[in-house]
Amino acid sequence: MSLRTRWIVLAALLGLAATGVVAVPRPANAFSLLISKIDSPAAGTEVAVGEPVTIRGSATNGESDGIVRIELSLDGGSTWTVVSQNSEGFTYTFAPTEPGPLTLITRAALRGEVEVPARSTTLKVTGTACPCVLHWPDPGIATHEEIDNLPVEVGLRFQVDHPGAIAGLMFQRYFDNTGPQFGHLWSGTGTLLAQTATTLVDGYPYLRFDTPVPVQPGQDYVASYFTPSGFYASAENYFDGTPIATGPFLLTGEAGVYSYGGGFPDQSWHGSNYAVEPVFVD
């Protein structure tokens, strides 16, 4: 007898034995162990428009009931495609048709239950047009998880090379950065221009603003996020003062910025890069 079955039987017996006690119905999915996920590619992976991408994923239940299907969404949960039936794994190949962040979500189903997705995997699709994600140059300095559990706002100070708008921001997220995370766009002097928040657990989440924020060349902006749990991505000595031009973005000086406790991040530390990147649209 499974733990779930024993609990239900015990609850029923206690309900029968206790005079005058009304048993509380078990909430739907209260014992659900139904979880699906994307195993590869990893969140934050760069892929190209028009090039085939193979998605591999799996699902588990933890009970005797079998997985009857797994579905995959290529548009953040708006539409779904069945990619597996009566199997706990799947492989699906497709070619992205447009650049920008691409959020993949899976959901599995039993005969009497459909998973409510709680996680996603966002890829960075590159192309010749925008939306444009930030392609990080590789100076041989990798990011790591900063073992720091203090609430903090971390971000990137940047400029753009032509007029456009910032649709949102992405950032590298480690497991211990439990959030919730709140994304912000600031002017160079600290005026808050837009804000948003995450809804799904993702290793490289895309925090989209309700409305893209117009930006102009020659002005500083800061894209950042606040995490009350800390454990953010960091790479010291990434910025050495050499200007970095990548796509429509220009990074100069101490581009990585932070502020403990939240608020406008205007401090820097040893040229650190906090793996925060704006998403630009024309």
Image: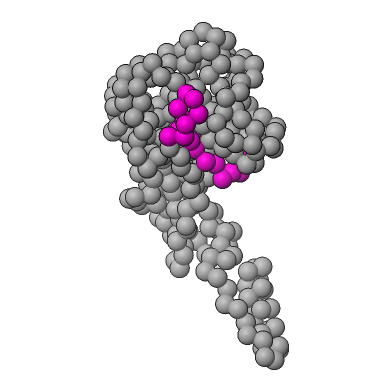
What's the residue at 51%, 8% (across, down)?
242
| Image quadrant containing the N terminus | bottom right
Residue at x 38% of width, y 16% of height? 218
Front one among 33 and 168: 168
Q: Position of residue 7 (x, y in %)?
A: 66, 73
Q: Position of residue 85 (x, y in %)?
A: 40, 55
Q: Nearer the viewer, residue 242 or 45?
A: 242
| Viewport quadrant of the C terminus | top left
Residue 191 is covered by the magenta coloring:
yes
The answer to whether residue 56 is above or below residue 139 is below
Relative horizontal placement of residue 79, taking residue 185 as reference (left or right): left
Q: Residue at x 57, y 35 (%)?
A: 263
Q: Quadrant of residue 49?
A: top left
Is 139 included in the stretch rendered in magenta? no
Looking at the image, residue 266 sits to the left or right of residue 127; the answer is: right
Residue 223 seen from this side: no
Task: Please provide the residue range marked out in magenta.
Answer: 169-193
State the image coordinates of residue 91 (x, y, percent, origin top left).
Answer: 42, 42
In front: 18, or 192?
A: 192
Q: Nearer the viewer, residue 5 or 28?
A: 28
